Image: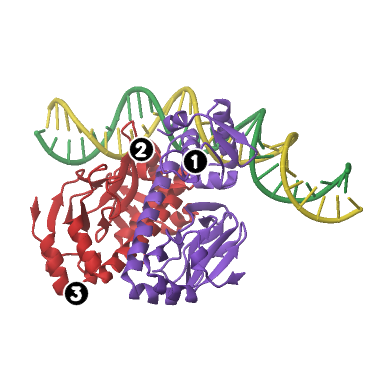
Chain colours: A red, B purple, C yellow, D green
Amino acid sequence: MTVGLDCARCPVRERAACAALAPDERERLAKLGHHRRVARGETVFAAGDSNAVCATLTEGALKIVRYDRDGNERILSLIHPAGFVGEMFSPVAHHDIVALTESRLCVFSRPQYEAIVSDHPELTAALLRRAAEELLETRELIDLAGRKSAEARVAGLILAFARAASHSPCHPADRFTLPLSRGEMASLLGLTIETVSRQLGKLEAKGLIEREGARGLALRDPRALEALVD
Amino acid sequence: MTVGLDCARCPVRERAACAALAPDERERLAKLGHHRRVARGETVFAAGDSNAVCATLTEGALKIVRYDRDGNERILSLIHPAGFVGEMFSPVAHHDIVALTESRLCVFSRPQYEAIVSDHPELTAALLRRAAEELLETRELIDLAGRKSAEARVAGLILAFARAASHSPCHPADRFTLPLSRGEMASLLGLTIETVSRQLGKLEAKGLIEREGARGLALRDPRALEALVD
DNA sequence: CGGACGATTGAACGTCATCAATCGATGTGG
DNA sequence: CCACATCGATTGATGACGTTCAATCGTCCG
C-alpha cells in the first residue's frame, strides 16, 4: 500500500533528515518518494536485496536483524520514528529490516535520493548527524548486552524503554507498554525467553516493577533499577 | 609529542576522509591540524572531555571503551587506520578512546574542522561514508558478542582478525599477531580472560589453530573455524 | 468453545565465572 | 649475569547462573 507524500502532516517533519531541506526542495524530494504502510512482522527490506531504496520511518518501530543458520533471529538495532534506513554505500543490503509494530515509512529510490543528497550538502550533514546518533545508540546496546548478569541486562533494557517512552528527555516514563515481545527482548540481550521472563518476575517480586499483561509495565522504583544496571 | 602534518607521506592519504578534498584544500586543512603520537595504553581522548577535538587515525589501532563502576572496561568499538574519531554532534565525549598499540593521529580542533566541513560537502559525504562503515562494523560486533557459546565467539573473533590482517579482501591471513590482549578479547566478547584462554587452548587441541607465544596465531583449518561460528 | 501463540513456571543439566595457584616472558637492580 | 619483581597467560577445582526441555497458563481470534 503506497501513496504520495504529504510532508505538512508528517509527524516527524521537524526531526527527520529531510527537515534540513528548504520547503521548496523538500517538495521536490516528496515528489520522488511514496508513503508505505507495513504491518507488524512484515519484512520491509530483505538482506541480499539489490538495495535500491532507502526510507525514513515516520511512525511505528523497526528492527534490523540477522538470522543464523538455525533460523534464530538476532536483533542488531532498533529504529525509531525519524530514523533513516537503507545502506547508502552498499550494493546489497546486509540485514533484514522488519516492522515491530504497524509502521509507516517514506520510501525513496536510492539513485534519486543520492542525486538530491549530492545537490544538497545540508541533507548530507543531516544524514551524518543521524548516523552519529545511530552509532551512539548501537554502542549503548553493546554495553547493555555485555553486562554480566541477566538481571542487569533486563533492568537496563527496561530503563532504556522507559526513557524512550517518555517525551521529557531526562525523566523516564513510569508507565508504558513494551515495544518488544519476550523473544525480541531476549534476542536483543543475548538471553533466552525464559530467562527474560524469570528476571521480570524477580524484579516484580522485589517491588521494582509491576507487569500489566504481557506488554504493560509500570516502574515502581526506578532508582533501584538504575542501581542494578551498574 | 605533536608536529605539523605532512599529507604527502600519510599512509592513509587515499582512504581517510580527507582524501575527498582537493589537494589545495587538504593543504589548508593540514595547516590547522597537528600530528600526535600516542603510546600503547595511553588515553587519547577521555569521556567527559569538552570534546573540542577530532582526529583521523593514520597508524596503529584504538579502542573505544567504557568503564563500569568497578573499573572493568568494556570495549565498544575498535578503530583502524583511516578511521575517524570524535563525536561531532555532542558537547561532551561519551566514551574513552585508548591506544591499543603505539599509534599516530591527525588531530584537529573541532570548531576549525567543522568550518572546513561546512565549506566542503565532499568532506561531509566522506564522513557519512565512514560513519556508515563504522555502523556496519559495530553491528558485526553485536552479532559476534551475541552468539551463545564461548567457542563460537572466540572462533568468530579470530576469523575477524585474520580477515583484517590480510590485505586481500576475501582470503583471511593464515598467520598474524593478535592486536588484543586476552583481557581485551574477553571484554570485546563479554567473556572472562580465563574462558578466552581455555577456548584458544581447545581450538589448538582440535588442530584448528596454533598459538605462537601470547600474541601469535596461525590458522590451520579456517573452514572448520567458520563452521563453528554458525 | 476450541485452537494457536506467547508467556510463565518447574526441574535438571551444562557452561562459564570465580577463586586460586602456577607458568612464562620481560625488565630492573644487585 | 643472575635473582627477583611484575605482568599477562595458563591451568585447575568449584559452584552459580543461565540454558534446555517440558508442562501449564493466559490471551487473543477464529
Location of residue B142 with respect to C14 vertically, above or below = below
Residue at image position (19%, 46%) is A40
Is D27 left or right of D21, judged from the image as shown? Answer: left
Location of residue A156 with respect to A18 vertically, above or below = above
| Residue A46: assigned label | none
Secondary structure under badge 2? helix
Query: Which quadrant is home to the N terminus of chain B?
Result: bottom right
Marks 1 and 3, Cα distance to the nearest angstrom? 47 Å
Residue at image position (38%, 48%) is B139
Marks 2 and 1, Cα distance to the nearest angstrom? 34 Å
Write down the residue under mark 1: B162
In which image quadrant can residue B20 be found?
Answer: bottom left
Tag 1: residue type? Ala
Secondary structure under badge 1? helix
Query: Which quadrant is home to the C terminus of chain B?
Result: top left
How far from the left and from the top, in percent, is residue C25?
A: 72, 42
Tag 3: residue type? Ala
Is B25 left or right of D24, judged from the image as shown? Answer: right
| Image depth: mark 1 or mark 3 in front | 1
Tag 2: residue type? Ile
Residue at image position (56%, 47%) is B179
Is B52 left or right of A38, judged from the image as shown? Answer: right
Question: Would you say residue A157 is visible in this rendering?
Answer: yes
Q: How many numbered badges does the structure rendering display?
A: 3
Along the line of sight, the residue nearer the viewer: B68 or A87: A87
How far from the left and from the top, in percent, is residue B164?
A: 47, 45
Question: Would you say residue A207 is visible in this rendering?
Answer: no
Q: Say whether mark 3 and mark 1 are on the same chain.
A: no
Marks 2 and 3, Cα distance to the nearest angstrom? 47 Å
Write down the residue under mark 3: A22
- Circle 1 residues within 10 Å: few <14, some 14–19, many ≥20: many
Write down the residue under mark 2: A193
